[in-house]
Image: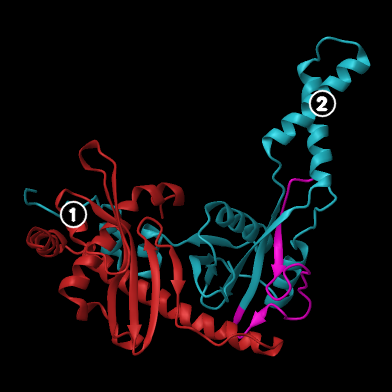
């Protein structure tokens, strides 16, 4: 295994490609993203997408924020060579909803809001409350792990360029 | 950020290594030996140590109070005193002026000024209470997984150092490369392909 700090910087691009691929998959092939065992029945982009364009010696950051914000500016940025660096995702399992931001370079989750749980009124409720939270966080962690695994499997495959990238390019061009 | 908050930030780690011997005894000892030390009324700037999830201002690792189900749940506490630079500059200037007057000199040697500054800082740190920051963590020992409830770089670095010192185990942070290598069940040829990857250009068309 490479030195961790070297690997972090050298493979940042993989995280950005993951989120860009994920946007494409959510728009075109959402069913194949879902892990039937995990119980989620929907996944969509939430209220925040950040893109970065470092091509042609420029360092451009495009942020799209707000509920109901259109992603057209983001598509234009993709056409100019940008990649997604951060994304807000909303996952649904029945009437329960998980919202979180995922950052490409670190795969860190932030602003993770799982379905609401009951408050802790007595000390003896604490253990149950922690276990319930662990279960809910585990769902979001497992989902992102599953999505990343799908991406990496595609990314190291010989089909990545001829099949996947070609389709993503066509999607960006058409969008 | 507390793990029971309505929203949390989470950094994922893989725990590398094994604890030889009685797990609970070794972990309890390590937590007790590296418990946060209070620095209020002390001349120190910073203190880093473990604290209890239930009682972060009265750490207590007796019994198995840090075990919840099959998880270890406790916290990293970082107490820090931050004195505004202008306050330091004012007190250093006053101390230098006093020394010049007392010694009837016109200037002080560089070493003397450094000593005065150190003494001023010790005095100010002793008078200033530390600001505590508490970050919860959940350690699934069987699964070799640890979740740290913050994404702050400095707090994550303190965690990695203290964890290794306390338990003689390494934490490997999960980011695109480590997650691919350690959590994606790649076969050897896929791992070889991973090492050789270079960035993709997604859009091959022309932007209007």
Q: Residue at x 45, y 71 (%)?
A: A112
Q: Nearer the viewer, residue A5 or A139?
A: A139
Q: Which residue is mark 2?
A: B94
Color scheme of the displayed model: by chain
Q: Residue B154 in the image: x percent, y percent?
A: 57, 51
**Display colour for chain B:** cyan
Alpha-carbon span between mark 2 and mark 1: 59 Å
Q: Which residue is mark 1?
A: A78
Q: Chain of mark 1?
A: A
- Compared across the picture, whether A47 is left or right of B162 comes to left
- Compared across the picture, whether A63 is left or right of B37 comes to left
Q: Nearer the viewer, residue A88 or B23?
A: A88
Residue B107's disc is none
- Compared across the picture, whether B19 is left or right of B107 comes to left
Q: Nearer the viewer, mark 2 or mark 1?
A: 2
Q: Residue A51 in the image: x percent, y percent?
A: 28, 54
Q: Residue at x 19, y 64 (%)?
A: A157
Residue B68 inside the magenta-drawn segment: yes
Q: Chain of mark 2?
A: B
Residue A65 inside the magenta-drawn segment: no
Q: Nearer the viewer, residue A138 or B23?
A: A138
């Amino acid at each position: 295994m490479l030195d961790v700090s070297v690997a972090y910087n050298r493979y940042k691009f993989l995280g950005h490609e993951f989120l860009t691929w994920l946007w494409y998959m959510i728009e075109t092939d959402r069913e194949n993203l879902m892990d039937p065992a995990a119980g989620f029945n929907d996944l969509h982009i939430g209220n925040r997408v950040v893109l970065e364009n470092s091509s042609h010696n420029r360092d451009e950051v495009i942020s799209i924020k707000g509920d109901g914000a259109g992603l057209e500016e983001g598509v234009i940025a993709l056409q100019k060579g940008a990649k997604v660096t951060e994304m807000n995702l909303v996952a649904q399992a029945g009437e329960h909803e998980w919202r979180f931001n995922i950052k490409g370079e670190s795969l860190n989750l932030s602003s993770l809001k799982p379905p609401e749980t009951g408050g802790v009124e007595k000390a003896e409720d604490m253990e149950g409350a922690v276990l319930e939270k662990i279960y809910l966080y585990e769902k979001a962690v497992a989902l992102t792990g599953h999505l990343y695994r799908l991406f990496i499997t595609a990314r190291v495959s010989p089909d990545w360029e001829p099949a996947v990238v070609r389709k993503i390019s066509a999607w960006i061009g058409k969008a | 950020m507390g793990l029971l908050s309505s929203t949390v930030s989470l950094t994922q780690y893989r725990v590398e290594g094994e604890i030889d011997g009685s797990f609970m005894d070794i972990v309890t000892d390590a937590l007790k030996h590296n418990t946060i030390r209070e620095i209020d009324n002390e001349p120190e700037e910073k203190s880093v140590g473990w604290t209890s999830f239930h009682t972060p201002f009265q750490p207590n690792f007796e019994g198995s109070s840090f075990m919840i189900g099959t998880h270890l749940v406790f916290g990293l506490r970082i107490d820090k005193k931050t004195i505004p630079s202008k306050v330091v500059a004012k007190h250093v200037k006053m101390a230098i002026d006093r020394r010049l007057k007392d010694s009837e000199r016109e200037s002080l040697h560089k070493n003397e000024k450094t000593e005065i500054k150190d003494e001023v800082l010790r005095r100010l740190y002793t008078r200033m209470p530390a600001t505590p920051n508490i970050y919860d963590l959940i350690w699934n020992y069987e699964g070799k997984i640890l979740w740290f409830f913050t994404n702050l770089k400095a707090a994550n670095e303190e965690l990695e150092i203290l964890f290794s010192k306390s338990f003689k185990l390494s934490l490997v942070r999960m980011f695109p490369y480590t997650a691919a290598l350690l959590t994606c069940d790649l076969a050897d040829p896929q791992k070889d392909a991973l090492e050789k990857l270079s960035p993709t250009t997604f859009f091959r068309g022309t932007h209007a």
